[in-house]
Image: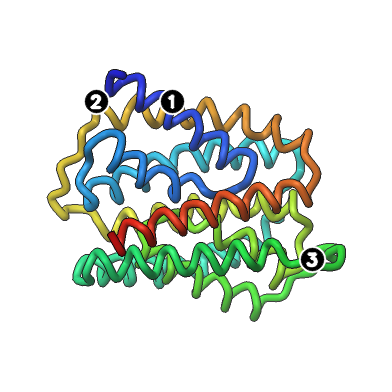
Amino acid sequence: MSVLVLALVAGAVIGLALGALGGGGSVLAVPALIYLLGFSPASATTAGLIIVTAASATALHTHARGGCVAWKTGALFAAAGIIPAFLAGAAARHLPAAALTTAFAVVAALAALRMLRPSATAPPERIRPVKAAGAGAGLGAVTGFLGVGGGFLAVPALVGVLGLRMKQAVGTSLLVITVNSLAALSARTGTGDDLRWEVIAPFTGAAILGAWDGRRLATKITGTTLQKIFAGVLLAVAAFMLVEVIV
């Protein structure tokens, strides 16, 4: 299968994940870029942030049209993570790749297990500035270190910490992903990564189109089902990455 076809297929799948689940895109993008398209880990991280930023912004627009974005909570959550994401992104370049991969897998697994825990129906949205800022700063730091958009952590935090309903958390997480991805990407500017734009461009285009379809998919799936799908994806990715480190 040609590189172009692989890029288009992978981009479409990642866009669907972002549009329907509000996260998981960069978790899938980096492995796809490395194992399917031959990117180096450093280049894959930077390229993944470019792709996820574009796709997340598209998905955010579609969710906003459906009224599924808590703008005030999301803006505070995202703003609190900008500086931590930038600083952690710069520091991550000096850490061993195996350590980052292991940390990524552990955090993803913990987030998945939290999503699988039964919980009561969330109350109506309440703005909690201290909790939103604290969770946002922590998420920004993790995003910077792991080089991902952070949606796989943002959704559980928005549901479990801030009490948003699942579908509203999905839409709001896209705002957080877009902001955090831009901050983390700015920390990698000028790192000399070899970015293959002939692959990144079609990959990004397919992800953007997939994000539009993902929003339509989300309207047909219940919040509980979304949580289970989301958790399953996270556990699978975590297991795969841990195996790669061990082997």
Q: Which residue is mark 3?
A: 118
> In x, y percent, where is residue 69?
70, 50
Residue 17 or residue 225, whichever sits in front: 225
Which residue is situated farthest in the left direction here? 192
Rendered residue at 27%/34% (across/down): 37
Rendered residue at 22%/52% (across/down): 42
- In terms of secondary structure, where does tag 3 sit? loop
Q: CA distance from mark 2 to mark 3?
A: 44 Å
Callout 3 amino acid:
Pro
> In x, y percent, where is residue 3?
27, 23
Q: Is residue 41 left or right of residue 87?
A: left
Residue 45 or residue 233, whichever sits in front: 233
> In x, y percent, where is residue 73?
67, 63
Q: Which residue is mark 1?
A: 9
Residue 59 or residue 97, whichever sits in front: 97
State which tag comes first along the sequence, 2 or 3: 3
Callout 1 amino acid:
Val
Quarter location, residue 160: bottom right
Q: Which residue is mark 2?
A: 198
- Asked if marks 2 and 1 touch (Cβ < 8 Å), the reply is no
Callout 2 amino acid:
Glu
- In terms of secondary structure, where does tag 1 sit? helix
- Crowding near pointer 2: few (<14 within 10 Å), some, many (20+)? few
| Foreground label between 2 and 3 | 3
- Crowding near pointer 3: few (<14 within 10 Å), some, many (20+)? few
State which tag comes first along the sequence, 2 or 1: 1
Quarter location, residue 217: top right
